[in-house]
Amino acid sequence: MEKFTVHESEIEGERRIPPRVSKILICNKTVGATKISMGVNVTEVGSKIPMHCHEDSEEAMFIVSGRGKLIVEGVGEYELTPGTAIFAPCGVKHEIVNTGDEPIKVIWAYAPPLPQHLEK
């Protein structure tokens, strides 16, 4: 594949419940990536990315804007502000709650990609 860039405006977001929008920017379908995937999630005020884990992928996240808290099951809570980076190892349950007064924008990356990110 000859594509090396993707602009957020090119990708249609997937609306999810609780209220948030997720966009997969870097994946097999968009640029042919097979070892990593990356995207953006915008979670509405008072909403959250529910508790979940990824058994076979590590996840890195970066808070672009907004405020919130990271809850790591069995470990604790961490304040999230713009500029905060997060690491979620394989199998560790975590959730992000928007505690601020504006949407929280999170950039995420998985390595290896989630299975659905490898679909063409």
Image (cartoon, rainbow, N blue to C red):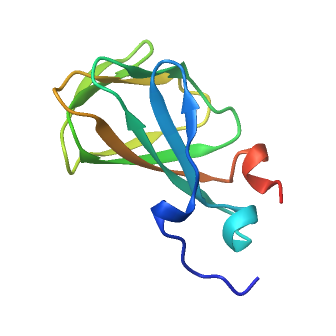
Left/right of residue 75 with respect to residue 15 in the rendered view: left
Decide which of 51, 22 is in the foreground and name it.
22
Q: Residue 35 in the image: x percent, y percent?
A: 70, 63
Image quarter hosting the C terminus: bottom right
Left/right of residue 35 with respect to residue 70 in the rendered view: right
Quick check: 10 above or below 2?
Answer: above
Name the residue rendered at 40%, 21% in the picture. Answer: 48
Decide which of 6, 60 is in the foreground and name it.
6
Q: Residue 10 in the image: x percent, y percent?
A: 55, 64
Left/right of residue 21 with respect to residue 102 in the rendered view: right
Quick check: 101 above or below 11?
Answer: above
Name the residue rendered at 43%, 12% in the picture. Answer: 74
Name the residue rendered at 34%, 28% in the picture. Answer: 44
- The quarter of the picture where residue 13 lies is top right
Name the residue rendered at 67%, 61% in the picture. Answer: 27
Decide which of 86, 47 is in the foreground and name it.
47
- The quarter of the picture where residue 11 lies is bottom right
Q: How many marks?
A: 0
Q: Residue 95 in the image: x percent, y percent?
A: 43, 23
- The quarter of the picture where residue 45 lies is top left
Quick check: 56 above or below 99?
Answer: below
Q: Residue 118 in the image: x percent, y percent?
A: 78, 55
Quick check: 9 above or below 12?
Answer: below
| Residue positioned most to the bottom | 2
| Residue positioned most to the right | 120
Image quarter hosting the N terminus: bottom right
Left/right of residue 31 with respect to residue 8 in the rendered view: right
